[in-house]
Amino acid sequence: MADPRLELDGVLRCPECHHAPYKIFRRQNRQPSGELLETFEHVLWPATPDVAPPKDASRICCPDCRAELRRVAP
């Protein structure tokens, strides 16, 4: 059985302090039977172990300066 694809899709970067605390990955979906689908889901992941998951997914802020993060290319 093939493994699902996992690709780096973007980085969330702070426009103020330029810290990049989170990465955005694309993960290939899989049916319950294990068959891979052609669709993907986005997964937000901390870039370093000292960064906690965001408390509010609708407004993701920099853990250092609290500015709202912007998505940039990897």
Image (cartoon, rainbow, N blue to C red):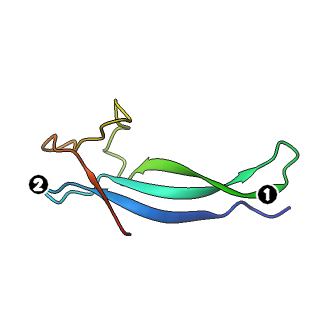
Task: Give the crowd class for mark 1: few <14, some 14-19, many >=20 residues within 10 Å.
Answer: some
Q: Quadrant of residue 16?
A: bottom left
Q: Amino acid at mark 2?
A: Glu
In the image, what residue occupies the spot 75% across and 62% down? 3
Secondary structure state at the residue bearing disc 1: strand
Percent x, y of residue 37: 77, 56
From the image, tell me which residue sits under label 1.
36
Which one is nearer the viewer's eye here, 6 or 47?
A: 6
From the image, tell me which residue sits under label 2.
16
Residue 49 placement, left or right of 62: right
Secondary structure state at the residue bearing disc 2: loop
Q: Looking at the rendering, in which quadrant would you find the C terminus? A: bottom left
Percent x, y of residue 48: 35, 52
User: Can you say whether 3 is above or below 60 in the image?
Assistant: below
Residue 62 placement, left or right of 25: left
Q: Looking at the rendering, in which quadrant would you find the N terminus? A: bottom right
| CB atoms of marks 2 and 1 within 8 Å | no
Q: Amino acid at mark 1?
A: Leu
Sequence-wise, the earlier of marks 2 and 1 is 2
Residue 47 placement, left or right of 28: left
Residue 18 placement, left or right of 71: left
In the image, what residue occupies the spot 12% across and 56% down? 17
Q: Distance of mark 2 from mark 1, alpha carbons?
A: 40 Å
* Residue at the top extreme of this rendering: 55
In the image, what residue occupies the spot 38% across and 38% down? 53
Which one is nearer the viewer's eye here, 1 or 15?
A: 15
